[in-house]
Image (spheres, grey):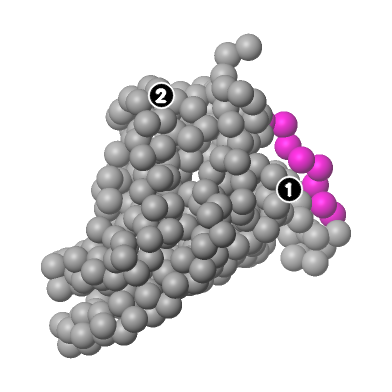
Amino acid sequence: MSQPRVIIYRYSSSPFARKIENLLALRNISYTNVNVPLAPPRDALLALGIAYRRIPVLAIDGDIYFNTPLIAQALERAFPPSEKHPTVFPGNDAMLQLVWSSAFADKELFSLAASGLPWSQFPINLLRTMNGGPKPTPELIKKMEAAWPFTRSALTTHLDQFERHLQDGRKWLFSTETPSYADISAHMTLAWARSLNSIKEVFDKKAFPQTIAWLDRLSALIAEKQKAIQIVTAKGDEAANHILAAPTLPLEPFDDVEAGRLYVQRDTAVSVTPDDSGKVATNGTLLTLTRSEIVLQTSPPSGQGKINLHFPRSGFVVRAQKAQSKL
């Protein structure tokens, strides 16, 4: 039986795309890249009827996934853990790894690191498009960059926490034999922060020897594993053709209790929207709803073919679309 094809929509400077690329390397999964612009509109995704703002977006054959924790779990199902495809959830703490990564590494720690971006080097219109909100003023940008010393101080506190955690000599954060999803998530943020001129000075090997050794150890392992997989780049139309023709996975049973609480019904029009930022709704027909996942079906603008879109319940809101007036 042939393995499913993995396609990732990404741009080169996206830390979260890099996170999934690192995960794919560690799991020995070859994949196809579709390069998209830093900010919307992204024609390769719009061709599939997807206006979702965040990157990465990942397809496993005809199923498309949003949100990196959900992507990681979907890849575990599509490529069951084996000697060929090692798991990124070793040990017995998979849920704890997911919760810690989502709440801390991907949000609190990443938001802190992102405040060290060189905001004044970005065109203001690009910042507006990236954030999906009002255009930031030059005064606000100046104020944000003036806060860099506070960012460095706060980041030092977190690095001290990592250092104390790693002080017992463990190789990986959850005392696993191989890197876990928690390692991948924290590495994403800290390796990226280490590349930013405004805050890289806090990554002091003398002050945080265990933390820097852990970062370097995982970076070296990822670089080694990337050599063993095949990574190809495709145009958006070629990727779309494959996705639209590929099979989709069987659906999990529909949870009528949860649907009743949310006032939605199977096979009806709904919208799914992130509950924090980037609040662009994705519309489609509700195929299934579980305690952990929302699956919509939608068609591309061409009207040819259908795709299944998977969202996590956590961090996303599903609502019934209002019926259009016939007047």
Mark 1 sits on what residue? 92
Nearer to us in this view, 59 or 14: 14
The residues colored magenta run: 249-256
In the figure, is residue 117 to the left or right of 87? left
When the figure is inspected, residue 200 is found, relative to residue 245, above or below; the finding is below
Question: Which residue appears at 25% of the width and 80% of the height?
Answer: 148
- Per the image, is 253 magenta? yes
User: Residue 34 occupies which quadrant of the picture?
Assistant: top left
Q: Toward which corner of the image does residue 49 lie, by quadrant?
A: top left
* Residue 40 quadrant: bottom left
**Residue sitting nearer the eye, 229 or 124:** 229
Query: Closer to the observer: label 2 or label 1?
Result: 1
Tell me which amino acid carries mark 1: Asn
Instruction: Determine whether, in the image, residue 309 is placed left or right of residue 221.
Output: right
Which residue is identified by label 2? 229
Q: Residue 100 in the image: x percent, y percent? A: 60, 62
- Determine the residue positioned at 42% across, 41% down: 22
Dot 1: few (<14), some (14–19), or many (≥20) neighbours within 10 Å?
Answer: few
Front-lying residue, 113 or 160:
160
User: Is residue 148 among the parts visible in the rendering?
Assistant: yes
Q: Quadrant of the N terminus?
A: top right
